[in-house]
Amino acid sequence: MKDGKRSFAKNSMIIGALSRFSDFLRNRFDESFFGWLLCGNYRHEGNGIIGLAGEKLKIRQRITVPFKRFNARAFENSLILRKTGEMFRKIPDVQFKYTGIFVFAFGLYTAISCLIKNFGAAIAGQSFYTLYLGVICAAIGGIISTSQKRLSETVAGSRILSFLIFRVLGIKPAAVSGTGKSRGRGDVSFVSGIVLGLISEITSPFAALLAIPVSALAFAVLAVPECGAVCVILAFPFLGMRQLALLCAFVTAAWLLKLMRGKRTVSTSSLDIAVLAFAAVMLAGGLVSVTREESIRYALYFICFMSGYFMAVNLIRTSEWFYRCISALVFSFSLTVIAGTVSAVGSPGLAGIPFLQTAAQKLTGIVSVPSEFAQLTVLILPFLLVCASGYRKTDAGLGLSLLSVLSVFCLFFTRSRGGWGSAVIGLVVLLLLVSRRSVGFIAAAAVICPIVRVFLPPPVTAGISEFLSVSGESAAYRTGLWNGVDRLITQCFAGGIGVGETAFEKVFPLFSQTDISANPTTKNLYTQITVSVGVSGLIVFAAILLIFLRHFCSFYSAGHGDDRRMRLFSAAGFSGICAILVFGFTEYVLADYRVLLAFWLVIGLTSSAVRVSVRERIHVPEPEGISLDIDMKKLRRARNATKKDTDKS
């Protein structure tokens, strides 16, 4: 059957002509000036102009290495940091039963406190949830307290915990193996549980109990900052703006601490410098603004979410971590799609359980605004499609294919014409990158679509034509808005009015009578940047896109790397960026903080795929950091011996 299909495709005159035409276009583009400009040989970042300048000036030998050694010794000689590290390293050796005593004490105190304070309300049936939590924790703690295993043995023996810690977060088993000596004290565990119960009097008992895994996760991020990038990708659709900004700042601080200690490295390319320049422009737009206080706050949030790019390019330096981040991105987006489906069909009432109601509101927060959900969908949908094609013969492929259909279903119900068009353009770009033969498929689809319209019922065609028409209330609103934006740009073309919705909402009524109270943006990504920070910001943003385009095109045309999956995922990231940039002509796509972070994460992951592929192809070893056990006398003897041998030769 497969041979018959191949022979049919090979002998078909139409398909053969389209294939030869696509080969002709590709060859002509490769020979053109723009083809040379975009698809020149990609060089490793250390061999570029920046790397050459650093090598000539000996920045690494004169500044970087001495600075890292000084900071490494300062951190290692700190008594507080050393004692804190020793305390955390002893945690895997604690017997699991002491954890049970801790949970039992917390549950017992919570249950008794609830009965004493709210006995009358509990009898009336008004608030049983805190009491239930205390009883459940006391019961679970009593069961756990019978265990004789150490905490490290419990983690290694649990399928769920080992999967979350070792597979999802990427922490090595040796990091939680411990020394093999059992530790722990029952009285300390019991008192700690009582203290946590006292803390729950100030806050919610659910929040107090949730502080335990959050603290453990924070320590894991400090030890392995790469797992912090995975946590950011997993959590960004569901956290509030402040919580997500705090998480990004914490992961960035953990990476900087590792960098100062000499245990991580930083790579610099022209794209990194362009992104830094855009961050500086946004900060200037916050400092020089008609509403300075609000603009500074907006600029700081914007820069904080831009750190997603630097997290991706500096922490994701191996293919293993890259695929782990892609899996996290697809998983978080899948949860968002499921939440969107439930929101479209109808969700069950959770009014009786405040905690679950709050969680449900955060889970469906991204889908509450259709345009924001459409922006996130067109950006991440190519990754979901590539994953589905990679596992197409397995059960996972079936599930991913179903999620792809659900995401298209949710995108359809957003009724966003810009989202529909940009999604189609992104899929076309992805098809062209995956296979040159897809030109025939795209041409056939362009021919079939008008023919299919003839066979549709008249009410359906009339509804589609009415929805896709450029006339109507929405078009009139955008026309009036953009006319006012044009007049505003002529007055603030050089420096802008400042970043943030507050500045635009204050200045725009002077140039137009269009009501923007519901959505104080220009409904266009590029005019919004120009209005906020002037033409300089638009030029820097265009430079970011051009450098990103050159890096990707030169890498993809050169065929670096033997891992086809890496190439496909980089193509997915590129097509997602193309789709969201097209969407930017009809919406300000960086208005929502989740879409903003996802935008810079996808750019960073795509750039990271390029760097990882080139690094693994030319076998560049990953630096292990600077050794802290340096014997300066031995080092001087070795240098003198090397110098004598050189003089003799």
Image (tube, grey):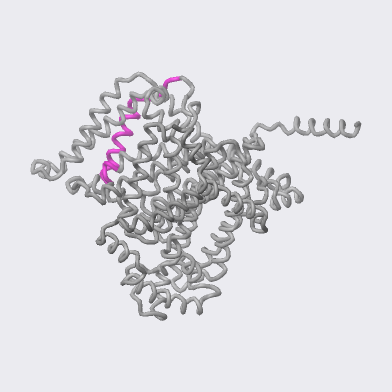
Above or below, comparing residue 638 to residue 451 in the picture: above
Residue 109: within the magenta? no
- The answer to whether residue 41 shows anywhere in this view is yes
Residue positioned 64% across, 34% down in the render: 628
Above or below, comparing residue 426 to residue 258 in the picture: below
Could you tell me what secondary structure mostly forms the magenta stretch? helix
Nearest to the observer: residue 95 or residue 313: 313
The C terminus lies in which quarter of the figure? Answer: top right
Q: Quadrant of residue 216?
A: top left
Left or right: residue 224 versus residue 480 is right
Nearest to the observer: residue 400 or residue 86: 400
Q: What is the x, y in percent for residue 602?
A: 49, 49
- The answer to whether residue 238 shows anywhere in this view is no
The N terminus lies in which quarter of the figure? Answer: top left
Residue 198: within the magenta? yes
Left or right: residue 463 versus residue 605 is left
Q: What is the x, y in percent for residue 526?
A: 49, 66
Above or below, comparing residue 419 to residue 256 in the picture: below
Residue positioned 64% across, 37% down in the render: 617
Q: How many marks?
A: 0
Residue furthest out toward the left: 124
Q: What is the x, y in percent for residue 404?
A: 37, 44
Q: Quadrant of residue 424?
A: bottom left
Q: What is the x, y in percent for residue 408?
A: 35, 50
Residue furthest out toward the right: 648
Per the rendered image, the range of residues in magenta is 181-206
Nearest to the observer: residue 584 or residue 224: 584
